[in-house]
Amino acid sequence: MNYQDKTLTCRDCGQTFTFTADEQAWFAEKGFDNEPTRCPTCRAKRKAERNMGGGGFRGGDRGQQGPRQMFKVNCADCGVETEVPFEPRGDKPVYCREHFAQHSPRRDA
């Protein structure tokens, strides 16, 4: 398909930006149907905000995160006290690191 540069307006900052023919071809190749709604600067800013914190979502204001709350429990196999990053509900056994690995299905298949 023959693409031509398009001028679009960023939904965040209101500035115009060029959606180049090469970018349009790349979008089509990846199967993206929609044109970008943010300029490259705002896309980069939004991506950086999403990646701040480096891991899964823990809720709250990402910039104000403190240490993860841990809960003390006893391993269902050996009885040793351990800490886990979730509050056990009591309906399932909780294991220490060593026994958790023994009870977990292999993930390398």
Image (cartoon, grey):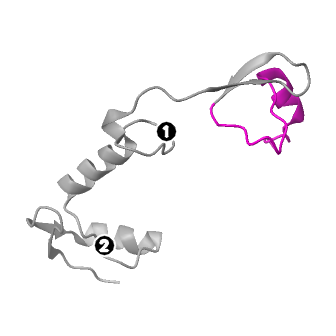
- Quarter-of-image position of residue 20: bottom left
Residue that badge 2 annotates: 24
What's under tag 2, amino acid-wise?
Answer: Gln
**Relative image position of residue 52 (x, y in whole percent):** 36, 38
Q: Quadrant of the C terminus?
A: top right
Helix, strand, or loop for circle 1?
loop
**Relative image position of residue 98 (x, y in whole percent):** 82, 21
Q: Residue most toward the bottom?
A: 1
Crowding at dot 2, Cα within 10 Å, few <14 / some 14-19 / many 20+, comes out as many
Q: Residue at x 20, y 55 (%)?
A: 42
Q: Residue at x 46, y 74 (%)?
A: 31
Asked whether disc 2 touches disc 1, contact meaning CB atoms under 8 Å apart, the reply is no
Q: Residue most toward the right?
A: 77
- Quarter-of-image position of residue 34: bottom left
Question: Is 44 colored magenta in this rendering?
Answer: no
Does residue 18 sit above or below 63 in this rendering? Answer: below
**Relative image position of residue 101 (x, y in whole percent):** 82, 29
What's under tag 1, amino acid-wise?
Answer: Gly
Foreground residue among 1 and 104: 104
| Front position among marks 2 and 1 | 1
What is the span of residues highlighted in magenta in the rendered image? 85-109
- Quarter-of-image position of residue 63: top left
From the viewer's perspective, tell me whether residue 56 is left or right of residue 106: left
Foreground residue among 14 and 78: 78
Helix, strand, or loop for circle 2?
helix
Q: Residue most toward the left?
A: 15
Q: Residue at x 26, y 56 (%)?
A: 43
Q: Quadrant of the N terminus?
A: bottom left
Work out how far the residue at label 2 is from the one at label 1, CA to CA, in angstroms: 31 Å
Q: Residue at x 18, y 53 (%)?
A: 41
Residue that badge 1 annotates: 55
Q: Residue most toward the front?
A: 90
